[in-house]
Image: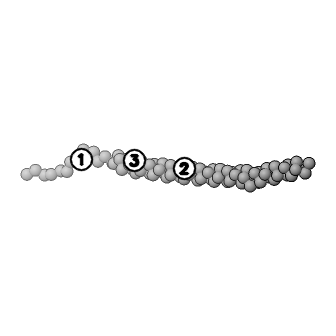
């Protein structure tokens, strides 16, 4: 009878050690790593969006500069300098 209780106590002690020394820490570590991965992904997403926005703004500014450079200049007509012939 005492042997039976000692065996049950040993089994419960092993289960306790398994749960609190292995399963709980693994669960907490997994949760922590997942949270960090989510933070990293969010950071990279923001960084990508900022880069895309900067590229769009640069392209838009370049396009505006090209439009200004190729804007039609005032047409002076077919004016030729007058030279007096002798």
Report the side of 47 relative to 10 (left or right): left
* Residue at 10% from the left image edge and 50% from the top image edge: 85
Along the viewing direction, whichever of 40 and 47 lies nearer the viewer: 40
Which residue was labeled with disc 1? 79
Q: Earlier in the sequence, mark 3 or mark 1?
A: 3
CA neighbours of label 3 inside 10 A, class few (<14), some (14 to 19), many (20+): few
Report the side of 29 relative to 78 (left or right). right
The residues tagged by marks 3 and 2 sit, at their Cα atoms, a distance apart of 27 Å
Query: Nearer the N terminus, badge 1 or badge 2?
Result: 2
Of tags 3 and 2, the one toward the viewer is: 2
Q: Which residue is mark 2?
A: 49
Q: Position of residue 63 (x, y in %)?
A: 42, 48
Residue 67 disc label: 3
Q: Nearer the viewer, residue 30 or 46?
A: 30
Quadrant of the rendered image containing residue 36: bottom right
Answer left or right for 82 relative to 61: left
The Cα–Cα distance between marks 3 and 1, rounded to whole angstroms, is 27 Å
Q: Tag 2, which secondary structure? A: helix
How crowded pointer 2 is (Cα within 10 Å; few <14, some 14-19, many 20+) is rated as: few
């Amino acid at each position: 009878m005492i042997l039976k209780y000692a065996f049950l106590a040993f089994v419960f002690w092993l289960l306790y050690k398994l749960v609190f020394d292995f399963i709980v820490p693994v669960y907490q570590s997994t949760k922590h790593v997942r949270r960090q991965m989510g933070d990293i992904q969010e950071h990279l997403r923001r960084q990508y969006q900022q880069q895309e926005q900067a590229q769009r703004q640069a392209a838009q500014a370049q396009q505006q500069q090209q439009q200004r450079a190729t804007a039609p200049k005032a047409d002076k007509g077919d004016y030729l300098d007058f030279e007096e012939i002798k």
